[in-house]
Image: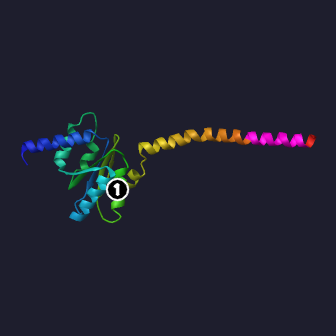
Amino acid sequence: MTREEKQQEIAEITEMIASTEVFYLTDTSALDAAATSSLRRECFKAGIRMRVVKNKLLKKALENIEGKNYSPLYPALKGNTSLMLAEVGNVPARLIKDFRAKHPKPLLKAAYIMEDCYVGDDQLPALVSIKSKEELLGDLVSLLQSPARNVVSALQSGGTTIAGVVKTLEERNA
């Protein structure tokens, strides 16, 4: 690889990482060609961009991005590294977990999600349980709707109860 090709590769990786808030570093080295193709298809279906990168070039790309601290990820830059970029924080983790039901890899080396760094394969369960922005908004809306729903329900049932009491008293007096 020539110096110009390396510079171009670094620029491409820098642009990819700067355009997202979520990326995972994985080890896919033990996968055969069929399993790798299957993983790439699953990534495509889930909206994840996957790319095998050289560690030195990835490190230089991370260093080029200003305003963010990627240094906790640097120790994970050993061996084969595949970069997975996504829009939702838990989607790559769920894909890795589901894929590992049939294959021993990919292993999670590290992940960067909205300013937080997760290093090591033992972080996968925590990453799977992270809620997406849409899930959090849905939970918030249902929490906000719950008290209003209870008040409306109480008022509606109370109206029929009061009407029933008045009707019963009216019938007794008649």
Question: In this rendering, is residue 146 above or below 50?
Answer: above
Position of 41 with respect to 60 (left or right) is right
Which element carries disc 1, helix, strand or loop? helix
Work out whether residue 122 can be spotted. no
Q: Residue at x 10, y 44 (%)?
A: 5
- Give the residue furthest to the left: 2
Which residue is depicted at the point 24% across and 46% down? 74
Q: Residues within 10 Å of mark 1 (few under 14, many from 20)?
A: some
Query: Residue 150's x, y, as percent?
Result: 64, 41
26 falls in the magenta region: no
Q: Is residue 84 shown above or below 170?
A: below
- The image position of residue 153, as x and y in percent, is 67, 42
Q: Position of residue 90 (x, y in %)?
A: 38, 49
Task: Name which residue lies at 88% across and 41% down.
Answer: 169
State the predominant SS element of the stretch in magenta: helix
Q: Nearer the viewer, residue 154 or 123?
A: 154
Q: Which residues are magenta?
A: 158-171
- Give the camera-side residue of 102 and 123: 102
**Occupied quadrant, residue 69:** top left
Q: Name the image colouring.
A: rainbow
The C terminus sits in image quarter: top right
| Amino acid type, residue under disc 1 in the picture | Leu
In the image, residue 148 sits, relative to residue 80, either above or below, namely above
Viewer can see residue 55: yes
Q: Pick out the residue farthest to the top.
A: 67
Residue beneath disc 1: 95
Q: Per the image, is 167 magenta?
A: yes
